[in-house]
Amino acid sequence: MSLTIEEVKKIALLARLALNDDEVQAYSESLSDIFDLAAQMNAVDTTGIEPMAHPQDISQRLREDIVTASDEREKFQSLAPATEAGLYLIPRVIE
């Protein structure tokens, strides 16, 4: 499928893209190549081929869930100007 210059200009207008004439020509060729590739892929007979989620049939290795950081909330809140019930208090900014 080949896109015309007018079709690319219309797509650019709808996408709110400002393209000069050189860019319109380049996008026309690039988009046409993409559509041609999609057409070639659609032409392949895939009857009897099971779809796959991933090309490799392996499972993901998972690491152990180990706590690596210590709880330092008390230390950080001792440095804050105002706290209450474990929360940081800030001045009201919206009235």
Image: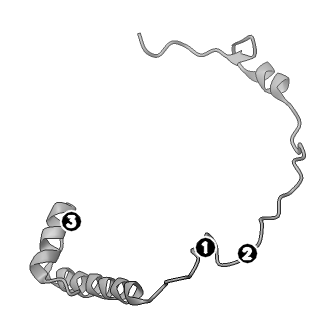
Q: Is 6 left, or right, of 26 in this rendering?
A: left
Give the CA separation, mark 1 to mark 2: 9 Å
In the depicted structure, whether residue 87 falls above or below residue 46: above
Q: Nearer the viewer, mark 3 or mark 1?
A: 1
Check disc 1 and report the residue beneath it: 52
* Quadrant where the image shows the C terminus: top left
Q: Residues within 10 Å of mark 2 (few under 14, many from 20)?
A: few
Q: In the structure shown, which secondary structural element does the residue marked by tag 3 occupy?
A: loop
Q: Is 85 left, or right, of 10 in this rendering?
A: right
Give the CA separation, mark 2 to mark 3: 42 Å
Check disc 2 and report the residue beneath it: 57
Whether tag 1 and tag 2 are in contact, CB under 8 A, the answer is yes
Q: In the structure shown, which secondary structural element does the residue marked by tag 1 occupy?
A: loop
Q: In the structure shown, which secondary structural element does the residue marked by tag 2 occupy?
A: loop
Q: Residue at x 21, y 83 (%)?
A: 28
- Rendered image quadrant of residue 10: bottom left
- The amino acid type found where label 2 is placed reads Asp
Which label's residue is closer to the chain start, 3 or 1?
3
Which label's residue is closer to the chain start, 1 or 2?
1
x and y percentages locating residue 13 in the rendered image: 14, 64
In the depicted structure, whether residue 9 falls above or below residue 84: below
- The amino acid type found where label 1 is placed reads Met
Check disc 3 and report the residue beneath it: 17
Q: Residue at x 86, y 57 (%)?
A: 63
- Rendered image quadrant of residue 1: bottom left
Q: Residue at x 56, y 81 (%)?
A: 49
The number of numbered discs placed on residues in the rendered structure image is 3
Q: Single out the residue that lies furthest toward the front.
A: 48
x and y percentages locating residue 83 in the rendered image: 71, 13
